Amino acid sequence: MKLFIDDANLEAIRELIEYYPIDGVTTNPSILAKAGRDPRETLKMIRDIIGDERIIFAQAVALTYEGMLEDAHMIMDLLGRNTVVKIPSTPTGFKAMMALKKEGITTCGTVVYTPMQAYLAAKAGASYVAPYVNRIDNMGYNGIGVVKQIQDILENNDMDCEVLAASFKNSQQVLELAEYGIGSATCGSDVIRAFVKNAAIDGAVQDFVDDFEKLTGKTSMSDLD
Ligand code: G3P
C-alpha cells in the first residue's frame, strides 16, 4: 500500500518525508485553503519539496466539463510528471475523466461516498478512486466496509484502477485497509505522526541504550574504543 500525506502544510510535509516512507502528497481545495496563499504557489512549493519522483495530487475545482479540462491542463502544466488530477466522481466528472484518459492525463475519481461512484469512475478511466472513510462513517455507514467493497469491485472486474482511501481519523483504520491490500491511503499529518506514537516502543528503545551504557559506559556502538 502506498502512503500519502493529505496536507499542504509545508513544514509538516518536509518533516514527514524525512522520517517516513512517503509516496507523495494529496491535496484538495479545502486543504489548499488552509495553507492560506495562492494555491498555485503552494502546489509548486510542495512539488519542490517532494521532488519529481513522488506523486502529487491536485484537484480540478471547476464544476463544468470544459472547466474541469482547463483546470486539469493547468495543473499538469504547473506540476509536471507524476501528477494526478483529482476529479469529483459526478456525471460531469465521469465525462471529464473519459476525455482526460484519451489525452493521457492520470486522474483520480474523488469525493467517493458510494461503491457505484467508484465503479463508474474506474470505468471512465480514472487510475485512482478516493473513498472518504471517516466521512462515510459520519453518515452512519461503514467507511472501511465501503472501501473493501470498492476494492473487491475493482479486482473482480479487472479494472486498471486502485483505491486511494482518504479521510482517516486513526491508524487502526489505515492498518485494516493495508491488511486488505488496498493500493494507497492518504492521511493527515497528525494521523501519520500517531502511527508509532507508543510509550512501549519508546521505553524498549531507551532500555536497550541504558543496558548498553551500563555495560560499556557509552551510548552508541561507534563511541566504543
Ligand atoms: O481529499 C479528501 C480528504 O482530504 C477528506 O478528508 O479529513 O476532510 O474528511 P477529511
Image: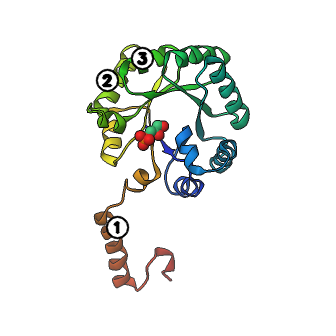
| Nearest to the observer: residue 225 or residue 17 | 17
User: Which residue is located at x 52 percent, y 47 percent?
Assistant: 7
Closest to the camera, between mark 1 and mark 2, is: 2
Label 2 secondary element: helix
| 17 up-or-down from 180: above or below | below
| 213 up-or-down from 145: above or below | below
Label 1 secondary element: helix
Label for residue 106? Answer: none
Identify the mark nearer the N-term, 1 or 2: 2
Name the amino acid, label 1: Asp
Q: Which residue is mark 1?
A: 202
User: Which residue is located at x 67 percent, y 49 percent?
Assistant: 45
Name the amino acid, label 2: Gln
Q: Which residue is mark 3?
A: 119
| Nearest to the observer: residue 35 or residue 178 | 35
Q: Which residue is mark 2?
A: 149
Res 139 seen here = yes
Cβ at disc 2 under 8 Å from ligand 1: no
Res 24 seen here = no
